[in-house]
Image (cartoon, coloured by chain):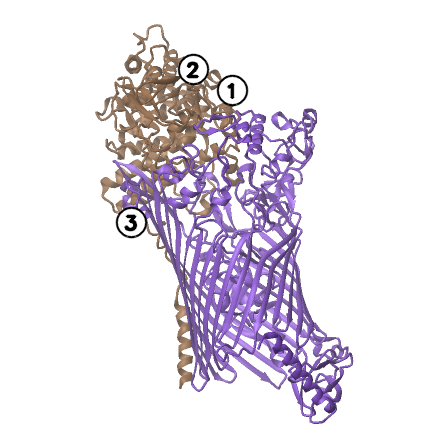
Amino acid sequence: MKLKKIILGLAFAIGLISCESLDVEPQSFYSDENFYKTIEDVEAAILYAYDALTLVSYAPVTYYLAELATDNCSVKPDEGADAQAFVNWEVTSQNELLTQFYRSVYIAINRANAVIENVEGKGFNPQDERRLLGEALFLRAYNHFNVVKAFGLAPLQKSLIDKLDETTAPLPEDMDEVYTFLIDDLTKAIDYLEVNRVAGRADKIAAQALLAKVYLFAASAKASGVPKYDAVTESADNLYAKAAEYSGYVLNGQGEYNHDLNLQNIYDVEKPTGPEHIFILSMDRLGTEEGNYSKLSKYFIPWLGGATVYLANNDNSYIATHDGWSVFQTNSDLYNSYEATDKRRNELIVSEIFDENGVSIGTIGDGTIPYPFTRKYVDPSFQGDKTSTKPYLIRYSDIQLVYAEATANTDGLIHYNQIRKRAGVSELPDLSGISVDEFRDLVIEERQREFAYEGDRLWDLRRNNIVQQEVVEAAGLSPEAVAFYPIPQREIDLNPNI
Amino acid sequence: MNKKNRIWLFSAILTVLCFGFVNAQITINGVVTDPGGQPLPGATIVEQGTNNGAITDFDGAFELSIANRETIIAVSYIGFIKKEIQVKGQTTFNIVLEEDVAQLNEVVVVGYGAVKKSDLTGSVSSVKMDKLPARATNSIDGLLQGQVAGVQVVSPSDDPGAGSVVRIRGGSSLRGGNDPLVVVDGFPIGNAGDLKQISPQDIASMEVLKDASASAIYGSRGANGVIMITTKKGAKNTTEVTVSQQNTFSSFTSELNLWRDPALMAELNNEGRINGGFVPIYIGAEDVNGVYYPSVQELKDGTWPYFTQWDDVVFRNPVSNNTNLAIRSQTDKTQFSLSTTYYTNEGIYINDDYEKLNINLNVIHKIFNDKAKVGGNVIYSKGKRNNNGGLAYWRNPIFPVYDDNNDYFLIGNNDFSHPIALTNHRTSKNEFKDFIGSAFIDVQFLPSLNLRTQLNHKFGHSITDYYNPKVYTLDGTFNNGAGGISNWENNETVVETYLTFNKTFNEKHQLSAMGGVSYQYYTSRTSDLKAFDFFNESLGNEYLAAGNPDQQSVANSLTETVMYSYLGRLNYTYNDKYLATFTMRSDGSSKFGSNNRWATFPSGAVGWKMHKEDFISDLNIFNELKLRGSYGISGNQGIAPYLINSRYGQDRYYVNGGWQTTIGPGFVVDRDAQTGKKTWAGIPNPDLKWETTSQLNIGADFAFFDRRLKVTVDYYDKYTTDLLRERLLSPSSSYDEMWVNDGEIQNKGVELTIDGIILNKENWDFSGSLIFSKNKNEVVSLGNEISSGLNTDALTGMKYEFSGSVVEAFRAIPNILAVGQPINVFYGYRVDGIIQSEDEGLAAGLTGALAQPGEFKYLDLNEDGVIDENDRTIIGDPNPDFLASLNLQARYKQFDLSLFFNGSFGQDIFDTKRFNEPSNQPLRWTLDNLTNSYPSLREGRNLFMSDWFIQKASFVRLQNFSLGYRFENLNSSKIKNARVFVNGTNLFTITDFEGYDPEVGSNGIYWGGYPKLRNWTLGLEFTF
């Protein structure tokens, strides 16, 4: 009797165990199984894609690639060998900074692909669907464009990767496939997006601006004989025309963004929605980890004894800043490229520092300041090392000069002159006696002065095939080695399709 | 009556008595044998109630004069039942002693059952607490140390409440964890090393399951071995109250190696800075931070008024307390035990404290006419820890504690190491509560059939508080005040039911079969609140809302795992000679990938009691001779859950003036604190599974001289495959790594235990045990060379990866895992003395500053003319060649003495403090001291990992010394017995190692720090 009960109990216990399942649902994290259910989910996902651009391994590293390897900046002598390699044009496939950059760009792409795959056909409001899809396509193109500029032919990730067998993407066939893909994404993005300015996000104008830059890159690279660009089927002239067309839309087709007449205003850390900023990254000093807040200022400002110093504004007021780590140091090539009256040097490059009362405490001349440094990344409300300084990703002035370069005509000259006028240097009265190529060269020179420290210089040099002309350290290298950084060794090792 | 008189009187009475009976004396003689007729030499014969006695000779014969024909003689011999015989005028005796079956039938606990020790086929070591000399230890690991061959217990830290590292037969995993499983009264409660919920006083016995035959019954949790703990139950047929009180007084084993001569310190510091091309500091001027540093002259002539021995400021002589009160009782029906322990532990640093309270209640009651038992066990444990360790005892002695205004004297604005400021203003504490409950029913519903169901539950909670104020701390200064609260809670339920069948057929076939099921459900929850930028910090982290609302951060997590198991065991004995055991367990775990949900772990073992064979017993040498052999497979599932799921990550993005939570693919698994560089994972592996360890064990048990000498020897070969590790993924995939099973490791070894009873007399006992274990460990494979990202040694082509973290002074990781080598060998350059001239340096292949006189002369191993990373090689091995320990126990009347020596031989230490310490800096190379032993002092020198820093670290330590006195026949009817003892731990160490102590973590890196503690404990125990 009692025995029976016990046996029954045992049978019950065994039965209980046999019926239970071993599948444990994730309870406190999201995965592809429990996400993208609502429009808010997708909203969080697209912001995750933007957020990738703020990674410590992405945003600051961009400057190692695009500024250090040029005539603009050199690096602090006791930075690691991987940083020195950029200045000396000895970047190998083992370079850890390069690998970090490469991996980060693909992180951003995968996050964009997650949105692209999970927004369509989910029954969301079509307006939301188009906006989110447009932004994701923009980001996928923006990051792939970075891949192309830095590495040339590298994998195009056209879909979300979430399985081991998807981690070995092949290389694209040629540059034509790459540019077709970029142009296709951006054309769709332009179609899907509206003009809708939000600092830290992209809208229709940003997509048009980026497409103009993509066309210009292909045009000038093809025209100047950059390796692999002969595969682009469209003619250089047509590509220039397309660049002109899309930059024209930006300059003439909208009223949200325009030319900012006040130079220092462009770089005011509190004004990410200033007229110039078509696409700007968003970081804030209230963040709790780097990436949420920015330390860009620390990279550009020299070590000045650890104290708070003051910089003179053009209205005779002063703004405070912490000092920095002296990582990116201004080259004399860049400093000397400015005319004496150029406000971009006199107002944006610092040669004298002050105390809180405006009393000078040192200059370049007396050795207090080791090198003239930019104040494009200064946050007077810094908290310790934390600032809101942001990378300027696409500025209106950039598109003005894209237009000038692409058209190389009197329409373009107007924009070229507008930039020079704001800087306080002489304008070019007309194009007489100046060939198209000569004018484009002038624009490239102007771009160096205008976008110094903004992470665009190497791309300008590369697409015009003038790296070796401007950067002595690059002498003697093969055209391929100049045009593209090597694909990281880790990718070559781990990806049998490369 | 004074004392002297009493002695006189006593002597007088004795004399009278002796004379009174002298005429009655007779002589008796005889032979003492075992049941088989073998003489027992050395047996004791005592006339009861007197000190009169004799010992048998080699033939077992004895002769004894007795005073009284009616007296009783007691005959005793170790391993046999004591016999009392009435003389009754008889003069010749043939005394046959019966073997003490209780001892032979000593039962040891194995997984899901118990087995007679003599019937064991696997490698199981048993430690019975009543046979262990009392050790003043506050941890179970401390009890186990040196008791079991093949078990290594290392306690690298003297911090209050710190755990230890327990390894059974070496480490067989790289990433899956190497801690043995601990099972308390049938409840598998977790990993060894930090079992704080059970007080050592409550333990009755511990069994260590070492080979696969023993541990495979725990399946996917058995590969690292299993420690079975049995707690004390009710006392026999009585009520017993035990009170014990221990106080421990600790102090450093050696002097601290700190600057006591500030002028010399300053002089050498200046020398080092000048040699490095820096401006010297001690020149009587302010440095860049505005701090005035006196000149060497000021320090020498006494003009400088300050000298602080910071070690006196931050260290104390800690006193710890352990009070235990236990009541145990047993009636025919009920057994009950209640034990409480209160323990406080002071750290060597001021205010660095730990305390805990354990309550353990155990009740067993018989029902159904004693055919069934029900019982329960409740353990409640709570405690707290105030962290104040790591204070700056190394602070510059030329600065005072307080300035002239009685404020803390800070060395510049970025001084975050003022020990008194941190002690008074920083908060760092932790509180924990644990509850462990079990209930069981055990039904013997047939004489041969038993059913046991046990339900176990464990609950743990911990809350951690911290606050770093705006001044005095780096974090607080950077964030304008930073504080937080972390909560952690776990729940674990284990339900197990098993049937045991036991029957002997035809008297010769003894069969025992067990089969059962097990279910385990585990959850862990955490929540983490942080705030920064406090406008008011008077309440610290108790008022996190005082932080800036924009900077508050919250995080929480919930983890769940489920495991189902089926298990079984078959024991078969033929004629009490031939033994066979088979076990099997199947584990299904939610941690395993969908393609590998169920794992099966079989094992088999055979044993042969050769001493039962006539051809052995006829030899009359062995009391026991048993051969054992086993082979089996066990596993290690020490992987985080959810690695089989795709996992999304989270961050924040600042949009429209506020933070938005962002979510998507890619999950941060690691973030470098210094560079902020993240490691990304989150891609699932549906093939992920357990690590598999197959183990062969061959052993033998011997007993000689009527079991006064026992020898156990074992050989094992453990081979682990499918090692859990992270494989690398191509960076274009956006993921850095993914968990896979790839890699192999082998541990082979020999274990030897010798127990001897050297002396066993009425008043004297002397016994000892020697334990020896040798383990040889080899990394056989680190998996796919490419996907594992292995490096190649330039000299030999050996594949390796670095293991551990960067040692800042060397900017290198000292340990590597290398194919064909033991785990964690040291990798670096070789040094051949010191360069004496620049020519010598250049000729050695060095350049620049490294080629100067006074620098290390690194060896150009590949002889390519330059010293670079291709000249690195294996320069040391932190794994010991063998371990040995010796336990000696002696008793004289009521005094008992025990000594425990522990030794570890053949291991190397990477001594990061070999140079630049106050004791060795003066020995530096200079132009006046062209030494080949130490380099010059040069600030900013880039140190390479080299064999110059490797030291031999073999040691023998008197780990434990205990001297006790037992009060017997106390006049008080209340107190049954009492014992006082003094116990010393870590009394002395014999070693060539130059640092404070050679016992370091398993990676062999010595960090300096401060000396080990020596502890003296005074203890008192009463039983009522």
Report crowding for label 1: few under 14, some 14 to 19, many 20 or more residues within 10 A (C-alpha): some
Q: Which residue lies furthest to the left in this view?
A: A255
- 10 Å crowding of disc 3: few (<14), some (14-19), many (20+): some
Mark 3 or 1, closer to the camera: 1
Under mark 2, the amino acid is Asp
Instruction: Give the vertical position of B444 relative to B408 (above or below).
Output: below
The mark closer to the camera, 2 or 1, is: 2
Mark 3: amino acid: Lys
In the drawing, what numbered circle is on residue B75?
Answer: none
CA gap, disc 3 to disc 1? 53 Å
For badge 1, the amino acid type reads Glu
Question: Can the viewer see residue A396?
Answer: no
Q: How many marks?
A: 3
User: What's the chain of the residue with tag 1?
Assistant: A
Residue A37 numbered tag: 3
Determine the colour of chain A: brown
Which residue carries the number 2 mark?
Answer: A366
Residue depth check, mark 2 versus mark 3: number of the one nearer the observer: 2
Q: Name the quadrant containing residue B899.
A: bottom right
Given residues B508 and B462, the one toward you in this image is B462
- Dots 2 and 3 on the same chain: yes
Instruction: Tell me which chain the residue with mark 2 is part of.
Output: A
* Residue nearest the viewer, comparing B325 with A404: B325
Percent across and percent down for residue A238 are 35, 21
Residue B206 higher or lower than B973, as above or below: above
Specify the colour of chain B. purple
Q: Give whichever of A211, B722 is nearer the camera.
A: B722
Q: Is residue B1014 visible to the viewer in this orientation of the structure?
A: yes
Q: Name the residue under label 1.
A: A473
